[in-house]
Amino acid sequence: MKIYISLILLSVASLSNADALGVRVSGGLWSYEASGDIRDSATATDTFNLKDDFGIKDTEEFQGFVYFEHPVPIIPNVRVGITSLKLTGNGNTVGTKLWNGTSILGDTNIISDIDLSHTEIGLYYEIIDTGFDLDLGVNVKLFDGTVSLSDGATVNASSTFSETIPMLYGSIGIPLVAGFSIGGDISYINYNSDSFSDYFVNVRWVSSFLLGIEAGYRSFTIDYADGDQFADVKIEGPYVNARLVF
């Protein structure tokens, strides 16, 4: 993740010097709660609940986005994002269950680590740019995650997953007064009974010195099953980002 952040900052430093380009940076903390169920495969019969079995904790983690915009109509603008999603918990399993071939007895105290962190790259067009803003495009989320379960002694179960999820993308902004605006954006895909969605609603303020703040609510949901993974998970909560607009 440090490499991605360094690349983003270097890109911002170089591109912000070009008069024809616009750069927006938004980053801060997302305070979220995670709920739902996971299984080690779509065909597995044992379901683990994030709260009841794993005791997943509410937490705060980093999210950051950079937007590169230009005046050329045919070439899309670019959006790059990073979200840290490391779910951790300590709970007692409800009933004896299997995870990736490892048996976990009922009422076993399990320390769980579930990493759903991801990067995303989007291409979009400014459909309306008159103060009232409407952007449409595509967004690709890149996951390379892990699930690790341990009782600190005999139980050590884990699995990994790597997925590339293409999604439709839309964003809207409505100006108010004195640098304030309201808006939101959404990334969404529904295909073959699987769905991913990630939406933001927010209030933004930008000063005459280019600095600003954004406060809002983010909800990220996964309803996905294939041979190696099953997840029906919702992660949501408020966030606050600092903003920099060139």
Image (cartoon, rainbow, N blue to C red):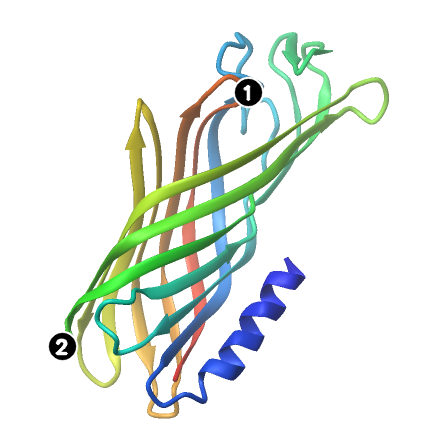
Which three-letter amino acid code belongs to the residue tagged 2?
A: Thr
Q: Secondary structure at mark 2?
A: loop
Report the residue marked by disc 2.
130
Horizontal arrangement in the rendering, residue 99 relative to residue 212 (left or right): right
Which three-letter amino acid code belongs to the residue tagged 1?
A: Asp
In percent of the image, x 42 and y 49: which residue is there?
A: 237
Q: Is residue 85 visible?
A: yes
Q: Nearer the viewer, residue 241 or 72?
A: 72
**Image quarter of the N terminus:** bottom right
- Whole-angstrom CA distance, mark 2 to mark 1, is 46 Å
Q: Position of residue 215 (x, y in %)?
A: 37, 65
In percent of the image, x 60 and y 38: which residue is there?
A: 145
Classed neighbour count for the residue bearing mark 2: other residues with Cα under 10 Å, few (<14), some (14–19), many (≥20): few
Q: Residue furthest right?
A: 153
Q: Quadrant of residue 181?
A: bottom left
In percent of the image, x 54 and y 10: which residue is there?
A: 44
Q: Counting residues from the N terminus, which is met first, the one under dot 2 or under dot 1?
A: 2
Q: Which mark is residue 228?
A: 1
In percent of the image, x 50 and y 65: which residue is there?
A: 28
Horizontal arrangement in the rendering, residue 7 relative to residue 106 (left or right): left
Q: Position of residue 201 (x, y in %)?
A: 29, 57
Classed neighbour count for the residue bearing mark 1: other residues with Cα under 10 Å, few (<14), some (14–19), many (≥20): some
Q: Is residue 94 above or below residue 205?
A: above
Q: Position of residue 216 (x, y in %)?
A: 35, 60
Q: Nearer the viewer, residue 31 or 199?
A: 199
Q: Is residue 191 above or below residue 29?
A: above
Q: Quadrant of residue 5?
A: bottom right
**Image quarter of the C terminus:** bottom left
